[in-house]
Amino acid sequence: MPDEKKIILSASGLTKVFGFGRQKCVAVDHVDIDLNEGEVVSIVGESGSGKTTLAKMLLGLINPTEGEVYFQGKKRDISSHKKKHDYWKNIQAIFQDPYCSYNIFNKIDTVLLDCIHMRGGRKFPRAKKVELMAEASSFVNLKFKELTNKYPFELSGGQMQRLMIARIFLLKPKILLADEPTSMIDACSRATILDMLMQLRNETGMTLIFITHDIGLAYYVSDSVYIMKHGKFVESGSADDVILHPKEVYTQRLINDVPKIHEEWDLSTV
Amino acid sequence: MSEVMLEVRELTTKYITRYQEDVYAVDHVSLKVKEGKSLGIAGESGCGKSTLALSMMGYYFAPLHYMSGEIIIDRRNISGMDPDDVRKSILGTEIAYIPQSAMNALNPTRKVIHFIEDVYQAHDPYKTKKEVYELARGCFETLGLPAEVLQKYPVELSGGMKQRTVIAVSVILFPKVLIADEPSSALDVTSQKMVIKMLKNLMENGFIKSMIFITHELPLLYNVTDDIMVMYAGQIVEKGTAKEAVFDPLHPYAKGLMGSIIVPESGLRDVKLTAIPGVPPNLKNPPSGCRFAERCKFVQPECKAISVELRDIGGGRAYRCILSEKELRDAYQREANQNAR
């Protein structure tokens, strides 16, 4: 039923300009994007291509210079603090650096409790809250008993990133924006985290947006891929089309630069 | 028969924590790197790769301590040498080391040429500034770096360029062995490729005689090095040529690592990634038996009791497992069949 696809988040003419005058820097340049419900999308680009700026604008963390974001067909309204919070119930993010994603003064219980409270569980009895938290931690292969009374910085990077997924498990947002979720983690934990995200997505049917520079990862997880360069999308389409049969020269170069194992890796073209 | 450039025999080193606990981060590691060859070391974070690199250089500053074993660089035994002597006579001339975040080590207030002058001042103080400049320029041009870089401040260079500058500075005295510890992990793919191309150039142009490359990115390792060694919890668990280690790993841990490779090639989406569950053991009190037993899929009851030796099966291949080669292959075959169904 491809016709019944519902667009959940879309942006039109989204632009962000930093600075002005001679130091003007157009980070994101009139980007249009439509995200269907339940789709897994990757936005791929080199460093400095404006991926994270785009993500921050979609999240409502920074205001776009121009353009609008539409959520579920309506213009997004985040003019007040309360409205922003309502918006964030539907869209959540995992950031690149797990070490500075947490408030270091809050214990892990508090981190998870906040999520339950945000979903309207403020009046739940204590036992139910603990049960929910334990369920979330077991989903990400962490033991809740070992987590209580610990601060986030006592965990390793991979564990922190998994705790982030536990938060998402409790919050159940409609859209999850993962901004380089695995770039600070080694290859082995990367597989674990991707598996968890995909499992969560299959259970809840949420829309998943991956922002990444890792083309292999983008190909592995996503239905469609957008290639970004200097704040613009240069190529987009289904993952198979874009990664295996790239049309743009830029995309071809990007894919050629990734080390391969079954195919020859051509070092001469730098 | 090419000469052995670096040989390490049964090297054991430990960290002593501030609570006087011993952490054996490198445990009876033996390896050989021949002239013109490169060795890759793979493994999860926290399994002792970087510690091994420091140990191989004889760079024992607290909390790292030398315990036993021998390090031989080009027929010269440096085990047990005073670390201050090592710094004067080994580093730079015999072994060069590129640490993980090397590009952040450049002092932002000094020009690139000053770093090279510093190196010469320590090792060859009678060279004039002009001679040093000429040498540096020749070296940079051979390596494909523009000579203007020498007169620039580090902040004026991009990340990839900084990293390549650091590599060029580190090989300026023509060391015998280069140890590169994750030289490209902070870079994007294009800069990474340039760094890799440069490292290969170093070998071809005779700047270095052999290389040790440490990373957790297996596709990279496969493309750069001749041999691969997989480490787990301070021990070597698998040794072999790059092709063998990637396509036909024997140890279950190595097999698990290979299962987590993501490359943008057709067929990737049909494969399910196999992550290894659990975390590496705490090296303060490592398990007495096989260190991988806790996380192993093919664990046998006796695995946790007997400590397993590295088994040499000829042709430079070795693995550390209680099961025989045939048993392991059968187990992998069974697993593959199960997944196919």
Image: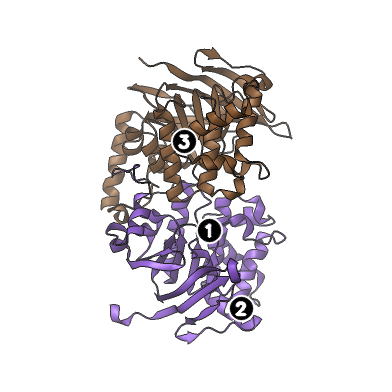
Chain colours: A purple, B brown
- Position of residue A136 relative to residue B165, above or below, is below
Q: Position of residue B246 (x, y in %)?
A: 35, 38
Q: Amino acid at mark 2?
A: His
At mark 2, the secondary structure is: helix
Label 1: few (<14), some (14–19) or many (≥20) C-alpha neighbours in 10 Å? few
Circle 2 is placed at which residue position?
Answer: A85
Q: Nearer the viewer, mark 1 or mark 3?
A: 3
Q: Amino acid at mark 1?
A: Ser
Circle 1 is placed at which residue position?
Answer: A138
From this viewpoint, is residue B288 visible?
A: no
The verdict on a common chain for dots 2 and 1 is: yes
Q: Earlier in the sequence, mark 2 or mark 1?
A: 2
Q: Chain of mark 2?
A: A
Which quarter of the figure is the N terminus of chain A placed in?
bottom left
Depth order, front residue of A50/A196:
A50
- Whether pointer 2 and pointer 3 mark residues with C-beta atoms closer than 8 Å, the reply is no
From this viewpoint, is residue B36 visible?
A: yes
- Position of residue A191 relative to residue B42, above or below, is below
Quarter location, residue A12: bottom left
Identity of the residue furthest to the front in this view: B130
Circle 3 is placed at which residue position?
Answer: B141
Residue at x-position 43% and y-position 43%: B194
Q: Position of residue B195 (x, y in %)?
A: 46, 41
The alpha-carbon separation of the residues under discs 2 and 1 comes to 27 Å
At mark 3, the secondary structure is: helix
Label 2: few (<14), some (14–19) or many (≥20) C-alpha neighbours in 10 Å? few
Q: Nearer the viewer, mark 2 or mark 3?
A: 3
